[in-house]
Amino acid sequence: MSAQDQIRETVEKNDVVLYMKGTKTMPQCGFSSRVAGVLNFMGVDFVDVNVLADEGIRQGIKDYSDWPTIPQLYVKGEFVGGCDIITEMTLSGELDELLAAKGVDFDKDAADKIREANA
């Protein structure tokens, strides 16, 4: 199976997928840590894909999304963005709206706490 096929299958079969450096419990870069931390804190059930474990996936995800950086977040098969975009969406409430619209469970109180702490 090609990297593109593997990525497509992962993104389509899971509600929320984060392509990141490291894992959700052991991120290997600050940007991946920030996005995984937000998702973990908000109680979002997500699949983490460690791009450091497979060079084909590391380059393949950049080609798949036509986005040059990692991490990359997908919700219900849709590319949402990287660290800066996810941070902005979290602070504005847009991430809550997207997750709710897509039927993805999350802790609204936790999301509100993130915003309060960054106000």
Image: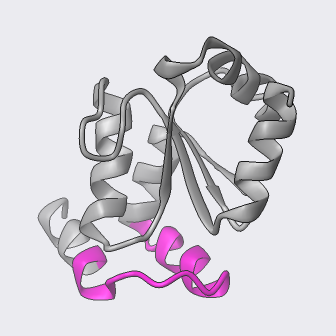
> Can the viewer see residue 77 in this picture?
no
Q: How far across and down, in percent of the image, does residue 30 sit? A: 28, 28
Residue depicted at 81% across the width and 23% down the height? 63
Q: How far across and down, in percent of the image, does residue 88 sit? A: 44, 53
Residue lying furthest top: 55
Q: Would you place residue 65 above or below residue 80 in this image?
A: above
> Can the viewer see residue 60 in this picture?
yes
88 and 75: which is toward the camera = 75
Residue lying furthest left: 117
Q: Point out the image quarter for the C terminus.
A: bottom left
Q: How far across and down, in percent of the image, does residue 91 sit? A: 36, 63
Q: Would you place residue 66 above or below residue 12 in this image?
A: above
Q: In this view, does 80 lie to the left or right of 23?
A: right
Q: In this view, does 13 lie to the left or right of 53?
A: right
Residue depicted at 86% across the width and 31% down the height? 1
Residue depicted at 38% across the width and 35% down the height? 32
Q: Would you place residue 67 above or below residue 55 in this image?
A: below
22 and 94: which is toward the camera = 22
Q: In which quarter of the image is residue 102?
A: bottom right
- Residue 110 is covered by the magenta coloring: yes
The residue segment tinted magenta is 92-111
Q: Would you place residue 49 above or below residue 47 in this image?
A: above
17 and 100: which is toward the camera = 17
Residue depicted at 44% across the width and 73% down the height? 93
Residue lying furthest front: 1
- Residue 40 is covered by the magenta coloring: no
Q: How far across and down, in percent of the image, does residue 46 sit? A: 48, 61
Secondary structure of the magenta portion, mostly? helix
Q: Quadrant of residue 107?
A: bottom left
Total numbered labels: 0
